[in-house]
Amino acid sequence: MSLNNLIKNWTSFRSRRPYLDQYKNADYKWAMVIDLDACTGCNACTTACYAENNLPVVGKERYEKGHAMHWLRIERYWGEGESVPVDMVPDRGAQFLPMMCQQCEAAPCEVVCPVGATHHSADGLNTQVYNRCVGSRYCSANCPYKVRYFNWWQYADSAWPNPLELQLNPDVSVRSKGVMEKCTFCVQRLRESMDHAKTDGRLVKDGEVTTACAQACPTSAITFGNLANPQSQVAKKWKNQQIALEKDEQKKDENMRGYRIFEEFRTYPSVVYLERVRDLEA
Amino acid sequence: MSHMINHDVPDDNEIQIEKKFVPKDLDIDKDVSWAQINKDVLRSLDRPRPVFWVIFFAALALFSFGVYCEKYQYENGLGVADLNNPQVWGLYIATFIFWIGMGHSGTLLSALLHIIHADWRKPIYRYAEAMTTFSLLTAALFVLIHLGRVWQFYYVVAYPNERWVWPNFSSPLVWDATAIGTYLTSSLLFLYTGMVPDLAICRDNATGARKKLYTFMSLGWQGTDRQWATFRVTYMTLACFLMPLAVSVHSIVSTDFAVSQNPGWHITSFPPYFVAGALYSGCAVIITLFILLRYVFRFEAYMTMPILNKLIKMTFAIAMVWNYLNIIEYSTVWYGANEIAKQQLLDKMTGTYAPVFWGMVFCSTVMPFTLLIKFVRTHLPTLMVVSLILNFGMWLERVQIITPTFGHSQYPWTWTSGWWPSWVQFGIVAGSFGWFTMLFMLYCKIFPTISMYEVKEMVHDQSKMLKAKGVA
């Protein structure tokens, strides 16, 4: 191989996006759209997530130590120049942002896991294998969104005192101490419906399966679906917002509200947020 | 332990007076006889004084406390260390880098200076090598301690298994494990190989259980021409093999950070910066141990002031390289276009961890300049304090690399301040120092800390002298 050839191949290898190419003709690519205009910050999604995914409630003391296990968290932001008041709220109120694992296509967490406990599934999920995890926490260190939660304690011993363990979701494993965990896009639901569809010899229809947070949202701010299906709600919204999965810098119409967080890091997240529109005078 | 070295121990004071004055231009006095070298070095293997046991048991107590902390953490989970999200690594990784770093100068001294025939290394490389090995062993402990499920640590090793599950070779942690494993085995081999002729001397002078140990370990060394020839080739080969390793190991450790995208870590100059930092802290420890061994074992005739002076010069040069790379790192961030990294740098300098940052600047950037003062270089207690400060500064440097980045990463919602490690973390860090001290003290009493056969190469060839005199 000549040097020219080598350089050419190398540049093409460098510019190729191996993670993204494989979804061009795939059947499934799970994705989400969150409309911040509709979000009221009511925390119903968080509660649903706790119930669905066997998340332990850690208590005030451990929460303050930073040991909370909220896979989906509602972040509260105040406007620029507004101090956080103790007894009053600015007229325009706070802004809310539900934040969960962005299921990045080129996830920074996946490359650094020493044992491959977090890896990419064929339907575009960033999965976490608890049995394989040794707890080096490198994935959390490298996650720009910091949405990975480590089991600092053996929560299973204390979080569900008898008879509360009966309300645990049997489809989801209860994690032991020392492993990392994060939002899975309710993978147990996805797998179940994909299995049903496979038995019937078809693909999962739009609306047939959804995540716990999307299901619980009273204002339908969260839309979940299969991006590979152009007829799905999610795919239509992505298209309306002129957002494509494989782009790292979206050139959009100014009227468009859609954006993905930290696109510039080339993580290719699967969650699109729709900006909140508000009247500055109000 | 019985008294195992069967030679006459002359009065200590006599020896000291006789040896103290070494001409300035010479590394060591060339008129020392070979028998005298043997005698002096083997004397260090004698029954230890009570103060040895006092220090040893203090180190053991410290180590036991570390073990207790680890047991407590093992049983209750890493929550007891007060690590949290996003502050996930804390002192464990910082101290891990510190120990790995310390393990670099031993190889530099022994391998590089051996290759370039810098003879002044000969009396001091042995303990530096041992220090390397033990600090690597200590560092390896931290890799395990910081794991959430330490009982599954073998997943990181590429071992054959029926499921065909391999570690993730794109992860810098796997590179780390491989690099450290390679470096540890090779430096252990290098240390041992270089020791074989000396072990034979020990064997010839020992009795009882020690005789058996040295007989086994000296591999039937007789000092024949053929053995020496083979030995020279092997030793040089190992030295050449170790040189690139010494550079690669800390470069690879730095990729843990440089490969990630966090502000404050994602910096191209990290590999050379880490290597320089490693050599720096390693040299500082070598100076500390130099002073200690020289004083405790009365090695004034071999660990001489001219050699110490060269060591200090080397340390100063490396400190300047480290400073330079530090300035490069901060100025590229400062003048660069990455707003996040710039904010993170400002946070590092003015936020919660400002004392750590400025402490590092004082201990590791300002303090080495005191080495320019002649009094500091020649007054050993002062030099000892300075070398310890340099080391503490390098530990602070590792902490200020790790901690502020977690406290102030890309995502504003996770910015935290005021994080402080719990007593468990400090206990384990203290325990690691106990462990290192213990190992090193045992080593000093079982193996010769000065390379006898190589010091003999530095003095006049007495076999020739004796022949000339017609004695032999």
Image (cartoon, rainbow, N blue to C red):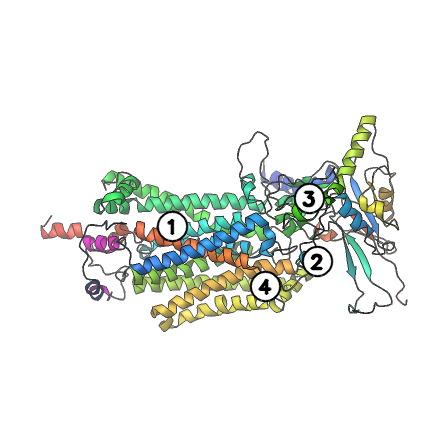
Describe the element under mark 2 as helix, strand or loop: helix
Residue type of the residue flagged with mark 2: Lys
Q: What residue is disc 1 on?
A: B111
Residue type of the residue flagged with mark 3: Ser
Figure quadrant of residue B408: bottom right
Answer few, some or many: residues within 10 Å of disc 3's Cα (few below 14, many 20 plus, some between 14 and 19). Answer: few
Q: Looking at this view, name the residue that lies furthest to the front.
A: A162
- Whether residue A142 is in magenta: the answer is no
Q: Nearer the viewer, mark 1 or mark 3?
A: 1
Distance, label 4 to label 3, CA atoms, is 30 Å
Distance, label 4 to label 2, CA atoms, is 39 Å
Distance, label 2 to label 3, CA atoms, is 47 Å
Disc 3: host chain: A
Where does residue A20 sit, x and y in percent of width and height?
73, 41
Q: What residue is disc 3 on?
A: A15
Q: Which of marks 2 and 3 is in front?
A: 2
Q: What residue is disc 4 on?
A: B330
Residue type of the residue flagged with mark 4: Tyr
Answer few, some or many: residues within 10 Å of disc 1's Cα (few below 14, many 20 plus, some between 14 and 19). Answer: many
Answer few, some or many: residues within 10 Å of disc 4's Cα (few below 14, many 20 plus, some between 14 and 19). Answer: some
Magenta extent: B18-44
Q: What residue is disc 2 on?
A: A60
Disc 1: host chain: B
Q: Nearer the viewer, mark 4 or mark 2?
A: 2
